[in-house]
Image (cartoon, helix red, strand yellow):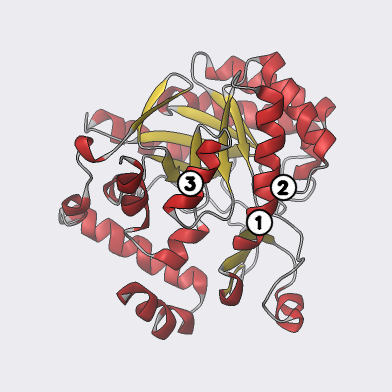
Amino acid sequence: MLYTLIFRLVFTRFDPEAVHHFVAGCLKLGSKLGLTRIFRLRTTQVRRVEAFGLTFNGPFGLAAGFDKNGELIEPLADLGFSHIEVGTVTAIAQPGNEKPRLFRLTPDRALINRMGFNNLGAARLAERLAKLRSTKKKLPIIGVNIGKSKITPIEDAVTDYETSARLLAPLADYIAVNVSSPNTPGLRSLQDIESLKPILVAVLAQAASKPVLVKIAPDLANEDIESIAELAIELGLAGVIATNTTISRDNLKTTASKVDGIGAGGLSGQPVRARSLEVLEILNRRVAGRIAIVSVGGIETTQDVRERLAMGADLVQGYTGFVYQGPFWARKINKELAY
């Protein structure tokens, strides 16, 4: 496969974040020149999916993290993703953590990142989405993933999330509340029910009729996953996104010395697959179709997506697989799922 050869001979020689910015630049240019439109799937080539009141052109979309500032929505949709979840965005713009902060574990087909929610802020994203909406172009389903600003104290998290939801809900198709990244100090403590409930209540109030989902970590205990599922049902959330990256480093093929040298960060890709499947099973048992489940973690093939759908997922998302499989990954999956 040509992309695999390019990845091995070219991309692996450069810093992963630099490669990401290069690819993003190519996508922007390709979209501007009309080149990415060549790869669009026709409506007859996709299986439409209904989830939380929205119609998706296929069940497979892009997870948050790739397009933090909503700059690549159109070209990413051209490449076959049925929905684009932009962000994570915070109420206050922030540069993220110090570089280097993105690392490949190629033997594991995985990434470790400690990006730290680097983004231009909710107000800038709102401006960009408003401009995009004003064009009246046909757009994919756009989700907006919101997180807590690093400088905001944990005790003020409700107000922080509320600000982002107020600015972005009118322009998003759905809102995803991220309380599960390991790269913002204290953030994962917000998955505790007592802390999580007021945040979700505040976001729901700002979101009005827009669907709200919560994104959880794979490292939660099973009983905590069940508690969050029950809370989501109680509050009338649209669904749960499972899962985010993991802090675990178990059973990796990459040498321990390299992993230790990388240090902290969230691990994504194939090593998350098994736990992501376990969490999906727990959630499906608990929610039983009452709210939606969006399954994320270790997705690479069409069969992976079929497996998640058969286990009760309404939608499936990927990100790390995009790095390892190349630009036509989503197109291939959503096209194959139509038959």
> Do tag 2 and tag 1 residues touch (Cβ < 8 Å)?
yes
Q: Amino acid at mark 3?
A: Val
Q: Is residue 307 visible?
A: yes
- The 10 Å Cα crowd at callout 2, few under 14, some 14 to 19, many 20 or more, is many
Instruction: Judge whether 173 appears above or below 120 on screen.
Output: above
Where on the picture, by quarter, is residue 126? top left
Q: Upstream in the sequence, badge 3 or badge 2? A: 2
Camera-near label (1 vs 3) is: 3
- The spot of residue 220 in percent (x, y) is 79, 43
> Do tag 1 and tag 3 residues touch (Cβ < 8 Å)?
no
Q: Upstream in the sequence, badge 2 or badge 1? A: 2
Q: Which residue is tagged 2?
A: 218
State the residue in front, 266 or 72: 266
Q: Which residue is tagged 3?
A: 305
Image side of residue 96 versus residue 132, left or right? right
**Which label sits on residue 272?**
1
Label 2 and label 1: CA atoms lie apart by: 8 Å
Q: Upstream in the sequence, badge 1 or badge 3? A: 1
Q: Secondary structure at mark 1?
A: helix
Q: Is residue 216 visible?
A: no
Q: Amino acid at mark 1?
A: Val
What residue appears at the point 52 percent right and 54 percent down from the top-left corner? 299
Image side of residue 339 versus residue 325, left or right? left
Label 3 and label 2: CA atoms lie apart by: 18 Å
- The spot of residue 310 in percent (x, y) is 53, 37
Q: Amino acid at mark 2?
A: Pro
The N terminus - image quarter: bottom left
Q: Secondary structure at mark 2?
A: loop
